[in-house]
Image (cartoon, rainbow, N blue to C red):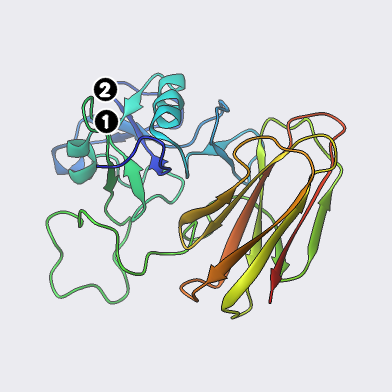
Amino acid sequence: MADKEERYGARCCSSSSFYRSEHKTKNGCSNYAGTITNIFSPGLGTTSVDGLYCPWSLTYAEAELFCSNLGATLCTEAEIEGKCAKASGCHLNWEYIWSLDPTTPAPTASPTESPTASPTNAPTDSPTGAPTTSPTDYPTASPIAIDGVRPCGFINYSMQGGQSYTQTYEVDLQGNTGWINIWYYMYQNPDQMRVFYDGQLIYTTGGLVPGEKTIPYYIDGRSNKLYVEMYAPNLGTAWQFKISCL
């Protein structure tokens, strides 16, 4: 059972068509499933197309709101395991996603969109109920619109602000392992920062904050990439961040 405040992906299902949904008819399915939205709500990430968003990292409440805005609900565990939400956008195959359960909402691993180059000897009937020991980087196959790729030590700076969407930056750790420093400077006008490593949220400001802070974090080498998500909704704001590999 997952805590409702943990963050996972989401896919929406309905008996009728909704925005960018696909009619699923294989494997005995008869529902519509979709993942991309043009309605922003908390937690959504930006895509390479202006005005479109993907639900890569939502709390359960955020996931419910995301689907509700589309006129749908979260897909049930049966729909997910029955492949009735498969390949419906945002590259969430093999990622853990929320399923609709009125009593114990829990993330369900959806099946892969296409077979791997070297699959197991025989496919299982349903995906495992626990995460793999070496999950893929966050996110897989670069589904989000990366606003920039930065090496360790690069200071990223923005004087924008007033956006209702997040900006995401990929940081190339360049094979470094061990301690890194996560540094930000939000000036006086508060902004928000979230940092993801190996599919996990490793740091968040917990909301909009002003000022400067340095946070040490140990990189174990499971991934060579780190993702920094910035959110600056206030006009006239500016921020900087830097990931230093020590």
* 141 up-or-down from 145: above or below: below
Q: Quadrant of the C terminus?
A: bottom right
Residue at point 46%, 46% (across, down): 90
Q: Position of residue 159 (x, y in %)?
A: 87, 43
* In-image side of 35 versus 191 (left or right): left
Q: Position of residue 71 (x, y in %)?
A: 40, 18
Residue at point 36%, 22% (across, down): 72
Q: Dot 2 corresponds to which residue? A: 15
Compare residues 134 and 27 and report the one nearer the observer: 134
Q: Residues within 10 Å of mark 1 (few under 14, many from 20)?
A: many
Compare residues 21 and 215 and report the one nearer the observer: 215
Residue 175 occupies which quadrant of the picture? bottom right
How far apart are the alpha carbons under marks 1 and 2? 15 Å
* In-image side of 139 versus 216 (left or right): left
Q: Position of residue 41 (x, y in %)?
A: 55, 27
User: What amino acid does circle 1 point to?
Assistant: Leu
Q: Residues within 10 Å of mark 2 (few under 14, many from 20)?
A: few
* 185 up-or-down from 84: above or below: below
Element carrying mark 2: loop
Q: Dot 1 corresponds to which residue? A: 100
* 235 up-or-down from 85: above or below: above
* In-image side of 75 versus 121 (left or right): right
Compare residues 136 and 5 and report the one nearer the observer: 5
Q: Position of residue 241 (x, y in %)?
A: 76, 55
Residue at point 32%, 60% (across, down): 114
* 24 up-or-down from 155: above or below: above
Say which label, 1 or 2, has the lower sequence index.
2
- What numbered label is drawn on residue 200? none
User: What amino acid does circle 2 point to?
Assistant: Ser
